Image: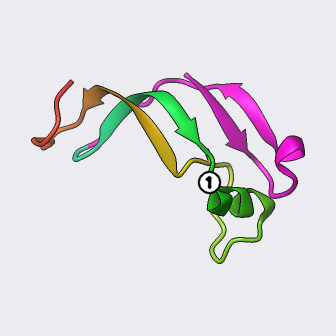
Amino acid sequence: MRAIVVHEFGNYKDVAKLETLPVPEPGPGEVVVRNKAAGVSFAASLNIAGKYQRKAPLPYIPSTESAGIVHAVGENVTRVAV
């Protein structure tokens, strides 16, 4: 999968890097979604800059908005399906 990954806080153009990562396997109670669209909100941009109330642990993938298709479901998931 491709994702924007932040390894350090700072200016979005300087610290947000497009990377290729393995597709994760869902754990118990988790769902993997193949995203078709994702957004980075104002709050996420503050987090990227290290200016949000709580800093995300690094590295992380910023996004507070996404839409897609369920790709895989973990054990004990009953409300959604592939």
**Residue stretch rendered in magenta on the structure:** 1-27
Disc 1 element = loop
Q: Quadrant of the N terminus?
A: top right
Q: Quadrant of residue 5?
A: top right
Image position of 57 with respect to 23: above or below: below
Q: Is residue 2 magenta?
A: yes
From the top left corner, tell me how far across and down residue 30 is, in percent: 28, 43
**Taking 75 as reference, is 66 left or right?**
right
**Mark 1 lies on residue:** 41
Q: Quadrant of the C terminus?
A: top left
Name the residue located 68 percent from the left edge and 36 percent from the top edge. 4
Q: Nearer the viewer, residue 7 or 37?
A: 37
**Taking 52 as reference, is 77 left or right?**
left
Name the residue located 68 percent from the left edge and 49 percent from the top edge. 59
Res 26 visible: no
Image position of 76 with respect to 1: above or below: below
Image position of 60 with respect to 46: above or below: above
